[in-house]
Image (spheres, helix red, strand yellow):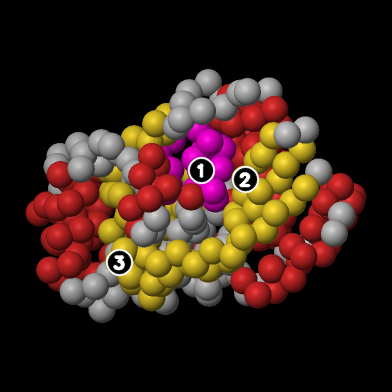
Amino acid sequence: MILEVFDIDLPMREALITSQQRLSRRSGQELHLTDQGVTGKGEVLPLPFWSKVTDLETKEELKEIQSNPEEYLMSAQSFSLEVQAGMSSALWAQKAALLDEPLWSFLGGTSDQLFVNALIGGGTEAEFRNSLEKAMNNGYGTIKVKMGFPEDQRRLKIVSELIRSETKVRLDANCSWTLREAVEITREATKLFRDQLEYVEDPVSTIDQLHQVRADLPVAVATDALTPDVEAIEQVISMGEVNHVILKPLLLGGIDSVLALSKVLRSAGVTPVISSSFDGPAGLTSWCHLAAAIGPNTTHGLGTAALIDDMRMKPLIPRDGVIKLSS
């Protein structure tokens, strides 16, 4: 088994603006794992604000693995979750390629396509309107709107003016609302969108606050930043107060971990939604195949290919809100 590691630095076509950060490029490593003449690819791109390691630290971890890739299988848990995610992708992709089978099928899936939402970030009102209009023109059936700005009420009204009657809306507060704001804004959103409002994500800043306010939120709830690890996910499952949990494979250790978590979530009546961490071509490919396998009827947060300035992203750019996977 041979592991090759390549440094990558991927500029974003447009900076992504949320209430907590501005992201303009993605840096890390691409992995090529070869065994029996067949190669599988993975990717390690630590996500600023979320990851506990930097791309320089993951590079050092990968140097250690390169010296003896086979031994990695015995000591995977000693490495960062980001490195585990990249290695998991490469290992699964290599095994699927060895059998000449698409990864989504090798993972047990039955469909080569998946539904994705459009991501509407921050910026000026003109930029916000432009993003919404572009999403409508590109045929998206679901939009995810970043919230947590002083003009949140204004943003809701703009969305209600521009979307079609069949468009589903997801609101992502990025843990920025107070208890009062969470209730007031979601109530206003419910009046504007009615059954088009699918859920509100991370409405408050802690799980304890979510417990306090959940009964007053007139809409389904999803968590992402509130549940960054397995322990937190298990906590909200036990509380029974969430309807969807967003899973970022890069930050959870990759394919194996997400497969296990998805099974636990579904058994508790909670829908897993796979989300991008603004990945590059190898990473996003892996997560799209994973999402197609575990949730073919769910709309996932993986429509981010157009954000990265790399020609290899082109096959992953959605058409009419759908990504069709090649083998």
* Residue neighbourhood size for the residue with mark 3, other residues' Cα within 10 Å, grouped as few (<14), some (14–19), many (≥20): few
Q: Is residue 149 above or below residue 114?
A: below
Q: Is residue 295 magenta?
A: yes
Pointer 2 or 1: first along the chain: 2
- Depth check, mark 2 against mark 1: the one in front is 2
> Helix, strand or loop at disc 2?
strand
Q: Percent position (x, y) of residue 1?
A: 81, 43
Residues under labels 2 and 1: Cα distance? Answer: 9 Å
| Residue at which label 2 appears | 41
Q: Which mark is residue 93?
A: none
| Residue at which label 3 appears | 14
The magenta segment: 282-302
| Residue at which label 1 appears | 285
Which amino acid type corresponds to the residue marked 2 in the rendered image? Answer: Lys
Q: Is residue 151 magenta?
A: no
For the point 51% across and 43% down, which residue is it? 285
Pointer 1 or 3: first along the chain: 3
Which amino acid type corresponds to the residue marked 1 in the rendered image? Answer: Thr
For the point 48% across and 23% down, which residue is it? 111
Q: Percent position (x, y) of residue 175?
A: 45, 70
Residues under labels 1 and 3: Cα distance? Answer: 21 Å
Q: Count the numbered circles shown.
A: 3
Residue furthest front in the image: 37
